[in-house]
Image (cartoon, helix red, strand yellow):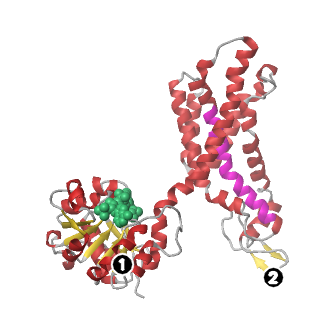
Amino acid sequence: MPGGDMAKPLLGCPNADSDPNLASAPSSRTIGILGSGDFARSLSMRLVSSGFKVVVGSRNPKRNASLFPSAAEVIFQADAIKKSDILFVALFREHYTTLCDLSDELSGKILVDVSNNAEINHHRESNAEYLASLFPACTVVKGFNVISAWTLQSGPRDGNKQVLICCDNQEAKRAVAEIAHALGFTPADMGSLFSAREIENIPLRLLPAWKIPVFLALGLFLCFYTYNFIRQVLHPYIWDKKNKFYKIPVEVVNTTLPCVAYVMLSLVYLPGTLAAIFQLYHCTKYRRFPDWLDQWLQHRKQIGLLSFFCAALHALYSFCLPMRQSHRYLLLNEAVKQSTLGFAALVISTLHTLTYGWTRAFDENQYKFYLPPTFTLTLLVPCAVIVAKLCFCLPCLSQRLRLIRNGWERGRNIKFTCPRTSGEFSSGETSSTV
Ligand code: NAP
C-alpha cells in the first residue's frame, strides 16, 4: 500500500516555476464538484478565480445555478462526472450512498473526500475509507477538510494555509496537491488513506482541548464573583442600607478577575506537584497517572493562557479605573507572558497579595457576613503549590525524584547512576543501589 511520510511537504512543495508538471495552466483543467452547498460554492469561487474550469454536479442544477459564479457550469451529477477526472465530493457521509447509482460513470475517477465528522472517531473507519469502499473503481483522496468554506471564499490570506492530503495512490495525491497549491494553499503529505482517520479529527481537536479549561475559568469566575458580590454589594446594602449596586459591572468584575487569574496560574503548577508526589509515593515513573491527573497535565497550557487572559482583562479594567495599583498589575502581566517566568509570576503575585492584604486579614471590618476577604481565599491553592515546590527542593526529595524521573524504581535490584543532566529540582551526579 503506497504512502508518503507523515506531515512531510508534499512532493517537495510543488512550485510552478520549478516543477514542469505544474506548468499546465489551471485553465486547461476541469474540476468537478458534487454537491451545491456552502463548501461547494466557496470551492467553486476559489477554483474559478484561480483559473480552473469548474463543473458542479447537483441533484437540482436549475434551482442552484444562481448560487454559483457564472463561470461555473452547474449541471446534473452524471453530466458533471463525465466532464472531469477529479471530483470533489462536497456531500456529507450520510449521502455518499446516493451516488451509488452513478458507480459506472464514476469508475476510474479521482474522488476528493472533503468531509468532516460531528464527533472525534465518530465511525470505525474514516469517511474517506468508507467512500473508497463504496466506489472501489475510484481513487479516493482525503483533503481540504481542514479548510473552512469561509477560508476558501476569502482566500488563504490569513489563518491556516495547510491542506492535509492522504491517499494510497501517489499520482492522485500529487494531482490534488497541485490543485491545492494552485489555490494558494500549502499541501502536506499525510501518507496513506488510513491517515484520513487522523485528518478528520483535526478540525474537532481545538475546542475539546479548551472545553475543560474554559469551564474551569467560568466556574471560578462565577464562584469568586458571587463571593465578591456578597461582600461588596449585598453586605453594605443589608447592613448599612447603602446602595452599591453600581459596583456590579466594573468593580466586582475587577476584583474577581485577578482572583481567577491567580488561582488559574496556581492550577497550572498544581498537577506537576501532584504528579511528583504520585511518583515519590509509588517510587516509579512507569505507573500511569490517574486519568483526571493525566487530563489536567495535558490542559496546563490552556489553563495558563486563560489565566493570562484574565490578568490582561484585569489590567484593562484597571486602566479604566483610576486604581493606584495598576502599575503593579502590569508588571505581573509582563511576567505571566513569559512561560518560563510563570512560576516567578505566581510567587510575585503571592507576595503582592500577601503585602496588599496582610493588615486587612486581621481587620475585623473586612469580615462581611463572617466571610474572609477574597484574597485570603485565593491564597490557599497558590500557597500550597509554592510550599510543595519548596519541599521538592529539599535534597532528600529532589534527588529521589530525579532518580525516579530517570527510570529508577523501588524494588528493582539494579545499580543506577543518574546521568549528568539538569534535573528539574537539582543537578549533579547521584548514584544509588537498591
Ligand atoms: P451543505 O451546505 O449542507 O451541502 C451539502 C450538499 O449535499 C447539498 O448542497 C446537496 O447538494 C447535497 N445533499 C443534501 N442532502 C442530500 C441528500 N439527502 N442526498 C444527496 N445529496 C444531498 O454542506 P456543506 O457545508 O457544503 O458541507 C459539505 C461537505 O463538506 C461535508 O462533508 C462537510 O463536512 C465538508 N466540509 C464543510 C466545510 C464548511 O465550512 N462548510 C468545511 C470543511 C469540510 P445538491 O442538492 O446539489 O445535490
In the picture of the structure, the residue carrying the numbered disc 1 is 140
Earlier residue among tags 1 and 2? 1
Say which of 140 and 2 sits in front. 140
Q: Point out the quarter of the image occupied by ligand 1.
A: bottom left
> Does the stretch in magenta take in 337?
no
SS class of the residue under badge 2? loop
Q: Few, some or many C-alpha atoms within 10 Å of disc 2 (few <14, some 14-19, many ≥20)?
A: few
| Amino acid identity at mark 1 | Val
Comparing labels 1 and 2, the label whose residue is closer to the camera = 1
**Lateral position of residue 228 relative to residue 415, left or right:** left
In the picture of the structure, the residue carrying the numbered disc 2 is 414
Q: Position of residue 318 (x, y in %)?
A: 55, 28
Q: Position of residue 338 (x, y in %)?
A: 55, 49
Above-or-below relation of 53 to 391? below
x 73%, y 20%: residue: 235
* Quadrant where the image shows the C terminus: bottom right
SS class of the residue under badge 1? strand
From which residue to which does the magenta span run? 256-280
**Lateral position of residue 220 relative to residue 165, left or right:** right
